[in-house]
Amino acid sequence: METMLGKIVLKLVALSGEVLGAVFDLLEKLGGSNGGEWLAMLKRFLRKEACWTKETVEAVAKITKSVLVFIATTTVSIPVGRFVARDHFKVDTSKRAKAKVSWLSDNFQNWFLDKSEEQAGGDSTLRSHKLIAASIDAPIIAELGGEAMAETSLVEMFAMMAKQGQGENGSLLTSGYWNIFYIRDTAGVLRAVGVDWFGDGWRVRAFSVADSFECFAGSRVVSR
């Protein structure tokens, strides 16, 4: 065992910096929340089979029970101070709006508009995933690593909306598909909040995570 381990160490030492970086990147991905998917794709690659196509991603998802594919991380800047929901989430499609909002659902208004959050300020890094199969919220939250990993904040959601405040392309989808966040309301209950660009602004709606309503495949899920 020691001899084999020694050989592995010697081989790693002999690798170039670029190759070694790729190896460590692969190991990190294999050990991450989507490790099962990466392992399945790696096995296909070693067999010289197609991987990371639409068909293979969907096939692997059925095997690994995965409904998410990691896309990228995005960083938003959070200002210091108190964030008051009703000061930011209001219907306003004028050019002066930080983030154009064209509609707020009744649920969102009832559950969130009285919410305020203290902000320490600084950069916040979030992960974006593509929902590759229609799913209710429970399996999505479980795959993200549970509520603690899935949960984001109104401040972070609004910061992402503001980065694309006029409907520009960016981390959030503006093609009509939903961008899904899991955020606690004023009573501390975790809710699913969907944001989509429609016409001349963002539409914002909220649902109970206990509902049997399925989020559409192709939607984007944002988490810690």
Image: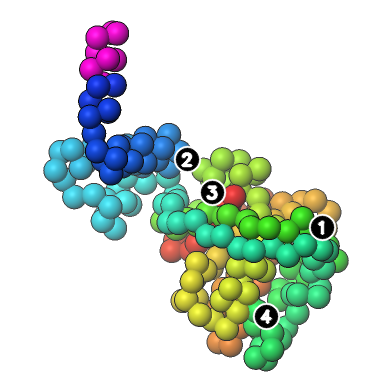
Q: Which mark is residue 33?
A: 2
Counting residues from the start of the chain, the first of labels 1 and 2 encountered is 2
Q: Secondary structure at mark 4?
A: loop
Whether residue 82 is visible:
yes
Q: What residue span does the magenta drawing correspond to?
A: 1-8
The one nearer the camera, 1 or 202, is 1
Residue for badge 1: 118
Residue for badge 4: 98
The CA distance from mark 1 to mark 2 is 30 Å
- The residue located at (60%, 79%) in the rendering is 165
Counting residues from the start of the chain, the first of labels 2 and 3 encountered is 2
Q: Are marks 1 and 2 in contact (CB under 8 Å)?
A: no
The CA distance from mark 1 to mark 3 is 28 Å
Colouring mode (rainbow / by chain / secondary structure / one colour): rainbow
Residue 5 in magenta stretch: yes
Pinpoint residue 175: horizontal percent, then vertical percent.
46, 76
Between disc 3 and disc 4, the foreground one is 4
Counting residues from the start of the chain, the first of labels 2 and 4 encountered is 2
Q: Mark 2 belongs to which amino acid?
A: Ser
Between disc 2 and disc 4, the foreground one is 4
Task: Identify whether 77 is placed above or below 148.
Answer: below
Pinpoint residue 96: horizontal percent, then vertical percent.
69, 89
Counting residues from the start of the chain, the first of labels 3 and 4 encountered is 4
Pinpoint residue 216: horizontal percent, then vertical percent.
49, 63
Q: Mark 4 belongs to which amino acid?
A: Lys
